[in-house]
């Protein structure tokens, strides 16, 4: 499933190809996506100019000059590419947006059809949708007080907290594991047992790990390719994710895997130990 770095990569790839481009027509396939595509939307989109390509959580948002917003979710296997109209069509292509004079197209392909393409009438309707989805803040601008308070208030473990899209938007299984390793915190530690210093460390680690992944164009596992068709490279740099039994890059201890919050969870049992009161007191003085 594409996570935030992969979605951000698609956004960055597509932006130069789509900004200021006009949608001439839309062709939709018959098989339903997770949210049903409405026929009226094709008519409403005709002649609209794409003003920008942006991201909110794992949603790709394209504001249009008509005031509408075209919104994509990649689900498990979604692919969104700007491509020459002459290029052959892949199977599982559900929506084709013809651009400008018809030489180029924006194509949405999704093998498992957990993704969606939706048209929102105006920015208020879009905001309402995100509010209803209770989408948390972007991981790059989490308010430190908000983060500490929310962690302190939860009995859930840190792994589970990171996966909660209402707490922070866009972090999935891979980057939750990598962030906890970066912060040297045990995935099993309860939010409420996390002192302020450790909460701050985790907040910073999430941003560091996601930035690093974006720099590598995200991680290519299974069907993900960026908007340009190029694969991500970050999977080469996983410290713990998918590395069960392999040596920890810091201390060479074997990486362990457990089941937590319903997901497989990878961590170093040595680097990510619960800190003793003594160690915590020391790091407070530093
Ligand atoms: Zn280690």
Image (spheres, rainbow, N blue to C red):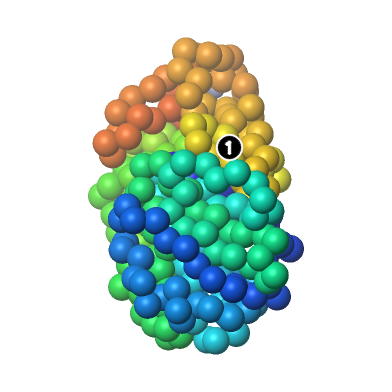
State the image coordinates of residue 119 (x, y, percent, origin top left). Answer: 43, 74
**Left or right of 39, for residue 199:** right
Few, some or many residues within 10 Å of mark 1 (<14, 14–19, 20+): many
For residue 62, which quarter of the picture?
bottom right
For residue 220, which quarter of the picture?
top right
**Left or right of 229, for residue 119:** left
Q: Which residue is drawn at 43% across and 53% down?
A: 94
Q: Which residue is drawn at 33% across and 25% down?
A: 258
**Eyeballing the image, is 117 above or below 220?**
below
Q: Residue at x 55, y 55 (%)?
A: 107
| Residue 111 visible in the picture | yes
- Name the element at disc 1: loop
Q: Mark 1 points at which residue?
A: 219
**Eyeballing the image, is 263 above or below 96?**
above
State the image coordinates of residue 49 (x, y, percent, origin top left). Answer: 63, 79
Foreground: 155 or 245?
Answer: 245
């Amino acid at each position: 499933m594409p996570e935030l770095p992969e979605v951000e990569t698609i956004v960055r790839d597509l932006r130069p190809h789509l900004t200021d481009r006009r949608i001439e027509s839309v062709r939709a396939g018959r098989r339903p996506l997770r949210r049903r595509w409405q026929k009226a939307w094709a008519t409403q989109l005709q002649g609209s100019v794409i003003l920008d390509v942006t991201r909110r959580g794992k949603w790709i948002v394209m504001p249009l000059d008509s005031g509408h917003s075209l919104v994509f979710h990649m689900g498990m296997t979604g692919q969104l590419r700007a491509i020459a109209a002459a290029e052959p069509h892949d199977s599982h292509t559900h929506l084709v947006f013809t651009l400008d004079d018809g030489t180029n197209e924006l194509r949405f392909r999704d093998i498992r059809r957990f993704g969606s393409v939706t048209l929102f009438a105006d920015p208020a309707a879009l905001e309402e949708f995100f509010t209803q989805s209770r989408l948390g803040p972007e991981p790059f601008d989490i308010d430190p007080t908000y983060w500490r308070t929310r962690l302190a208030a939860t009995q859930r473990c840190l792994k589970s907290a990171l996966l909660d899209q209402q707490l922070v938007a866009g972090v999935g299984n891979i980057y939750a594991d990598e962030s906890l390793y970066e912060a040297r915190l045990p995935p099993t530690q309860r939010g409420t047992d996390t002192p302020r210093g450790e909460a701050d460390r985790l907040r910073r680690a999430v941003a560091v790990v996601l930035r690093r992944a974006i720099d590598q164009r995200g991680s290519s596992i299974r069907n993900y390719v960026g908007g340009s068709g190029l694969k991500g490279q970050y999977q080469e740099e996983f410290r713990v994710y998918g590395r069960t039994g392999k040596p920890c890059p810091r201390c060479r201890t074997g990486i362990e895997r457990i089941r937590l919050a319903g997901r497989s969870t990878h961590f170093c049992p040595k680097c990510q130990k619960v800190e003793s009161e003594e160690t915590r007191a020391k790091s407070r003085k530093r």
